[in-house]
Image (cartoon, grey):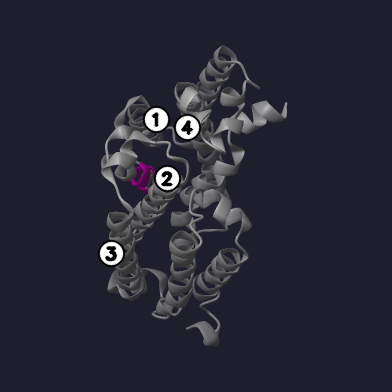
Amino acid sequence: MNAYIKLLRPKDWAKNMFLFLPVFFGGHLFEIPRLEHLFEAFFAFCFVASTVYIINDYRDREDDRKHPKKKNRPIASGAVKPDVALVIAAVLLVAGAILSVMADAKLRFSAILGFYFLMNMGYSLGLKNVPILDIIIVAIGFSLRVKAGGIVASTSVSVWLNLMIFLLSLLMAIAKRRDDIILKQETGIDMRKAVKGYNVEFLNIMLAMFSGIIIMTYTMYCVSPVTVNYLGTYHLYYTCIFVVAGLMRYLQITLVLNQAGSPTDILYKDRFIQITMLLWVAAFYALIYLKNYTLFK
């Protein structure tokens, strides 16, 4: 049973929490009807994403057996038969489609989810082997989650916020490719064909470049007149310290410790980033939801 649960990669479902960002930043976190539809959308995304993971693992099972960590994946290790995995993927895809209609009867969310699925199918079928395009597709996936969350919750999504999420996703994808190169240098095995289009120096430059752009974009979001007027506070720039601290820690993990292979594992295990994120959420919550108190005006 554990192998079948592991096949779905439930740890990676945390990525779909990006669906809740628009309702949180929009100040509608406690409006139950919006949340009900968002949870339907969340599980729809989880099921479709798991479908993508299964198909990807099915196609990569031979290459995964060469990887020091991926060789333990259910299909690669033989714990789950390939044909059984495909049946599970089909069931999850149907369940995700049904939930998507429940989340948004106008099918706007279904359209985004369908595009996400097709894009990732293209990724699994070969686009992941095209340098630069591979990391852009990963980043678009996160941007689609934010856009979908805004549609389901009937909440406008700031251009600055969506741009920041896209750039942050690019940063994490770049760090992951860097980890692949380090692994190649240590083992001599190409874990990804796209790695041939990168080297450590190029990726280090991109990490530095996008880190600066992310900080600038987040700052612009916080001080934007549209954001200030919509949320009713100009103190959002206080939260910049947590974004800067989190980015510095992530770069330290990537450049110093060479352990950026799994952003999800970092989120679950790194105490510094966990505390930084909690403080960031708490600060935003206070500024948006407690703004009637004099201290936060």
Verify whether residue 140 appears in magenta: yes
The residue labelled by disc 2 is 180
Please state the extent of the stretch shown in magenta in the rendering: 138-143
Q: Choose mark 3 or mark 1, whichever is in front.
A: 3
Instruction: Find out whether the residues at labels 1 and 2 contact each other: C-beta distance under 8 Å.
Output: no
Kind of element beneath mark 3: helix
The residue labelled by disc 4 is 100
User: Is there any visible trace of residue 102 in the rendered image?
Assistant: no
Q: Is residue 260 left or right of residue 161?
A: right
How far apart are labels 1 and 2 at the CA level? 25 Å
71 to 283, vertically: above or below: above
* Residue shown at the point (47%, 51%) measured from the top left: 18
Kind of element beneath mark 2: helix
- Amino acid type assigned to the residue bearing label 3 in the image: Met
The residue labelled by disc 1 is 117
Of marks 4 and 2, which one's residue comes earlier in the chain?
A: 4
Q: Quadrant of residue 285?
A: bottom right
Q: Choose mark 4 or mark 1, whichever is in front.
A: 1
Q: Position of residue 173 (x, y in %)?
A: 39, 49
The residue labelled by disc 3 is 209
Q: Position of residue 110 (x, y in %)?
A: 40, 32
Of marks 1 and 2, which one's residue comes earlier in the chain?
A: 1
How far apart are labels 3 and 1 at the CA level? 30 Å
